Image (cartoon, rainbow, N blue to C red):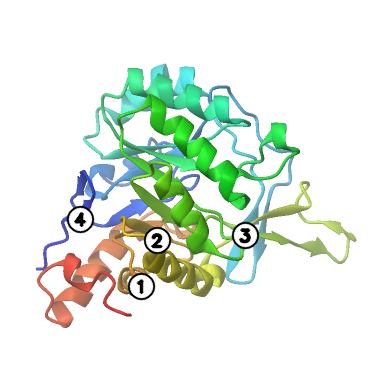
Amino acid sequence: MADLTTKLGALTLKNPVMTASGTFGYGFEYNKFYDIAKLGAVVVKGIAPFPSHGNPTPRVAETACGMLNAIGLQGPGIDKFLHGKEYMPFLRTTNATVIVNIWGKNVADYQEVARRLEQDKTGIAALEINISCPNVKAGGIAFGTDPVLAKEVVSAVREVTTLPLITKLSPNVSRIGDFAQAVVAAGSDMISLINTLTGMAIDINKRTFKIANKTGGLSGPAIKPVAVRMVYEAAQAVNVPIIGMGGIVSGDDAVEFLLAGASAVAVGTAIFADPYVPLKVIDGINAYLDKHGFNSVQDIIGLVK
């Protein structure tokens, strides 16, 4: 059996498979199916300085080979996350590697939640900065679609935390390499990509939008070719660990990302159909390495040039 130990800068994971933020909750429900500490890491649903009720319903719609969602970053807020029994206190009992995804409506929000987590960081391995959020002070433009704003928010978070930083990049840009370089220059230790693509679905019988927000984030197998391409481009642009995601449902899917330059992968939408998919992906990567005579998962990272 090959060695699946994964190095992400200062982080060492037992394997390269983690969950994508927003698709695994806070691990509480899934721990009833299996020991979530078996995963490389659990990336929790986004945490802001305040509670968020999210968008009005309906906010999920099935599409060909995927789904649209406009959940709206519903979450408990930093206070409840740190003290509510089904959130961080629960995660500390599991021995899972925990990565906390953070977001806000302005730079100060990001900095505040990062500061709070720095003060109570027991059991937290890293922070993942979600820069796909709209900046209310900049007229609603997403931090992740303006390299200046992206750099500003990462710099602000870097000032207040010693935890390793991952910046989750938006695919809704023309030159992903420029954004990768901008956030790394601002202090991000690694990057993750891709977040969802912006999409829309219309109910032709009701002649209305399928989700109340009109647009939503497209995820699932349909976006995998786009995600693999962007991971490859990012790997050519920066020399930091990359976490690849977008449409992974099998070990073979994960291997594509690793060959393209990702050091680890995250499974997301597939979990809604089968909560055991992350474990199956781990087994699939192992089977691929054994079949092709590789001793370690590190041996295949970025092999395709």
For the residues carrying marks 1 and 4, which lies nearer the camera in this image?
1
Residue at the bottom extreme of this rendering: 292
**How far apart in space, not on screen, are marks 3 and 1 (Cα)?**
20 Å
| Quadrant placement of the N terminus | bottom left
Q: Pointer 1 and pointer 4: residues touching (CB < 8 Å)?
A: no
N-term-proximal mark, 1 vs 4: 4
Residue under label 4: 6
N-term-proximal mark, 4 vs 2: 4
Label 2 residue SS:
strand
Q: Amino acid at mark 3?
A: Asn
Residue under label 2: 244
Residue under label 3: 172
N-term-proximal mark, 3 vs 1: 3
Q: Amino acid at mark 2?
A: Gly
Which residue is more in the foreground, 29 or 179? 179
Label 1 residue SS:
helix
N-term-proximal mark, 2 vs 1: 2
Residue under label 1: 260
Q: Amino acid at mark 4?
A: Thr
Kindly indicate the quadrant of the structure image that contains residue 253. Answer: bottom left
**How far apart in space, not on screen, are marks 4 and 3 (Cα)?**
29 Å
**How far apart in space, not on screen, are marks 1 and 4 (Cα)?**
16 Å
Q: Amino acid at mark 1?
A: Ala
Kindly indicate the quadrant of the structure image that contains residue 82. Answer: top left
N-term-proximal mark, 4 vs 3: 4
Image: 194 above or below 106: below
N-term-proximal mark, 3 vs 2: 3
The residue drawn where x is 58% and y is 23% is 51
Image: 90 above or below 145: above
Q: Residues within 10 Å of mark 2 (few under 14, many from 20)?
A: many
Q: Residues within 10 Å of mark 1 (few under 14, many from 20)?
A: many
